[in-house]
Image (cartoon, helix red, strand yellow):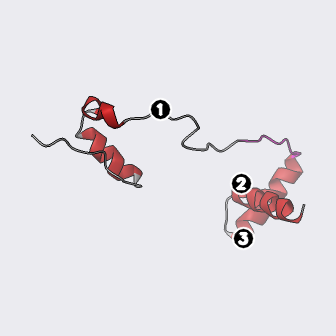
């Protein structure tokens, strides 16, 4: 029986489907230990606003048709680009 090779797939869905139908132990000789993080996680930052500030941001975001968190994220990115 011909031994399978690990697939070269960039799709999370395709990888999930592959591993749903294969056993990791069949590929032990091809595995290598990851020495660095494979995926970067987002970092959440909490800020405290006065009720009037929060309401003003929600109103401004709604007028632009975006969630308030997206508007704040946009402001942070813009500020970092000019820093």
> Please, is residue 81 above or below residue 11 in the view?
below
Task: Look at the picture and state if 64 lies above or below 42.
Answer: below
Query: Depth-wise, is mark 3 or mark 2 nearer the camera?
Result: 2
Between marks 1 and 3, how big is the CA–CA gap?
A: 46 Å
Which disc, if any, is residue 69?
2
Nearest to N terminus: mark 1 or mark 3: 1
Mark 1 falls on what kind of element? Answer: loop
Tell me which residue sits at (41%, 50%) in the image: 12
Residue 82 lies in the magenta stretch: no
Of circles 1 and 2, the one toward us is: 1
Q: Which residues are magenta?
A: 44-50
Q: Secondary structure at mark 3?
A: helix
Q: Nearer the viewer, residue 56 or 39?
A: 39
- Residue 8 located left or right of residue 39: left
As drawn, the label of residue 64 is: 3
Q: Earlier in the sequence, mark 3 or mark 2?
A: 3
């Amino acid at each position: 029986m011909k031994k399978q090779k690990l697939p070269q797939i960039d799709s999370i869905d395709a990888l999930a489907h592959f591993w749903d139908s294969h056993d990791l132990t069949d590929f032990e000789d091809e595995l290598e230990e990851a020495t660095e993080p494979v995926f970067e996680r987002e970092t959440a930052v909490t800020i405290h606003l006065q009720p009037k500030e929060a309401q003003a941001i929600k109103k401004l975001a709604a007028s632009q048709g975006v969630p308030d968190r997206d508007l704040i994220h946009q402001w942070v990115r813009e500020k970092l680009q000019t820093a």
